[in-house]
Amino acid sequence: MKDRQKWEKFRVEKKELHDAETERTQTKLNAEFGFPPLKSKTIVPISPFLNLVQQPKELSYEDVEPLPPNILRSDCFLRFEPGSFEIPKELGSKMKDGDKLIYLSLGSMGCCNLKLMKRLVELLGKSKHFFIVSKGLLADQYSLADNMWGAPTVPQTKILPLVDLFITHGGNNSLLESFYFGKPVIVFPQFYDQFDNGARVEEKKFGFTFNHNRFKDQELLDAIENIFNDNELLEKCRKMGERIQRENSADAVAAEMERRL
């Protein structure tokens, strides 16, 4: 939600329509399974002992408020798929030097939005760029365009170093993996934290975010070209990836956890 004037109205409606029902349901579940009642209206309360936050400092909110001493921030805890990955010949043989390669994945749940996946494939099939697509569980229900290669599942952390841009649902792991490799993103949030992640990406100028129900075809095509033509944005992403890899904050967080034992 880009219009901040609507934020307060959203907070009120969320509290009335979502939070109250969630609290009632969780209270009922706790009683049914013998767990103690909620001590606060927060379903996942902040521990008084130690908490972990996974977010690059370039996108963190420490510019607004510093983290309390019992919250440790890591840029990312990266998962690496085993093995290697090479661009399939049926796609690579069509590419020339200087051609751009884009990775499209809306996550294990977002890829089940068949209407959206079909629309994106049809639209991006008109692009001059090339695409690797994580098709998801419904892979057999749609076909890819000639400038694409895809499979039901793909090794994401092996693919990201090879591409120039990531079109993503904005899930926390996917977003952090993209930034680890210094790639810009276009976010199509589906639910929960993805909306906040997408808004922060755009606010900090590491890419763009779109409402997947309301975006216009040309808006997405223009966003892709704007990213590829924005040397400042590309350099910001590259430097962020280099910093994350160099500082390896996950090891520092692990060491601090051990120190506090």
Image (cartoon, rainbow, N blue to C red):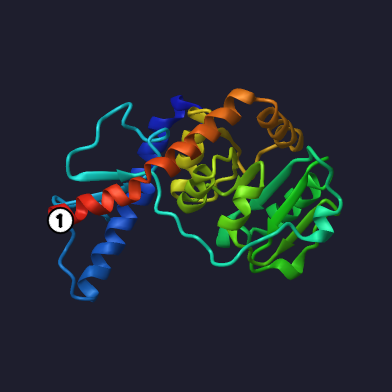
Q: Is residue 46 visible?
A: no
- Percent across and percent down for residue 76 are 40, 48
Q: Nearer the viewer, residue 135 or 157?
A: 157
Question: Residue visible at 42% across and 33% down?
Answer: 58
Instruction: Please say if 218 is above or below 26.
Output: above
- Percent across and percent down for residue 29 are 27, 69
**Residue at the far bottom in the pictured view:** 33
Using residue 118 as the reference point, say whether residue 104 is left or right of it. Answer: left
Name which residue type carries label 1.
Lys
Question: Residue visible at 80% across and 50% down?
Answer: 122
- Percent across and percent down for residue 155 are 60, 62
Using residue 233 as the reference point, say whether residue 255 is left or right of it. Answer: left
Question: Residue visible at 32% across and 47% down?
Answer: 53
- Percent across and percent down for residue 249 are 34, 45
Q: Which residue is mark 1?
A: 39
Q: Secondary structure at mark 1?
A: loop
Question: Residue visible at 75% across and 70% down?
Answer: 140
